[in-house]
Image (cartoon, grey):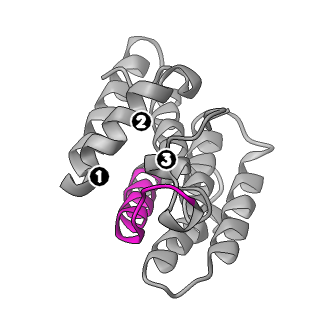
Amino acid sequence: MILPKVRDPRLVTVRRGGTLTDADHRLLALWAASCAEHVLPLFEVVRPDDSRPRDAIEAARAWTRGELAMMRARAVGGHAMGAARDLRGAARHAAYAAGQAACVAHVAAHDLGAAAYAIKAARAGRSGDESRAAGVEECRWQRAQLPAAIRELVLDDQRARNDICWSVFEC
């Protein structure tokens, strides 16, 4: 479970009674897509002929450009998560990251799902002592990609939801 029981109004769009602007919602989706894309090779090396996770990342980006409806982006995200179901390890987590990125169009708080699964993928792609280091490196890379307009929001949310996101944001 990556979504909190009580939603932070800063991650709820203005249309739904929160304070999140459309511009910041799009930035969250773009950041989530970047996080997922960064680990996508961990999926594609295992399933090179399955485009569902890559399609989900593109769906997130297309939604930000106004080229794809929210419900369509969400559906494509679900298909990417379907690609993960029979997999294990890094490939599974990378597919989930892509699916979560596309679902940001529907619920902005899925941004941390994309980031958390990407960190899990990076960890699973390494063994032993290198696993934790890979997760820290991925977390730091993600934070370096954060646009200034949403940086504090995301970092606050990471602190608040770290426990339900497998404590991956300790970097």
Disc on the earlier residue, 2 or 3: 3
The image shows residue 118 at horizontal and vertical percentages of: 48, 41
- Position above or below: 112 against 13: above
Q: Position of residue 24 (x, y in %)?
A: 36, 63
Please check the rendered image and state whether residue 49 is part of the magenta-colored stretch, yes or no: no
Q: Residue at x 45, y 26 (%)?
A: 160
Give, as a single range, the part of the protein colored magenta. Answer: 17-36
Disc 3 residue crowd, few under 14, some 14–19, many 20+, Cα 10 Å? few
Please identify the quarter of the rendering in which residue 159 is found.
top left
Q: Residue at x 54, y 28 (%)?
A: 165
The correct choice, above or below, for 168 with respect to 143 in the image is above
Q: Is residue 27 left or right of residue 71?
A: left
Amino acid type, label 2: Asp
| C-alpha gap between disc 3 and disc 1 | 14 Å
- Number of labelled discs? 3
Please tell me in which quadrant of the rendered image residue 140 appears.
top left
Amino acid at circle 1? Ile
* Element on which disc 3 rests: helix
Instruction: Name the residue located 51 percent from the left edge and 77 percent from the top edge.
Output: 63
Indicate left or right for 86 with 20 as reference.
right
| Quadrant position of the C terminus in the picture | top left
Q: For the N terminus, which image quadrant? A: top right
Q: Callout 1: helix, strand or loop?
A: helix
- Determine which residue is flagged by label 1: 150
Mark 2–mark 1 distance (CA, rounded to whole Å): 11 Å
Which disc number belongs to residue 157? Answer: 2
Q: Is residue 26 magenta?
A: yes
Which residue is tagged 3?
Answer: 9
Taking 86 as reference, is 35 left or right? left
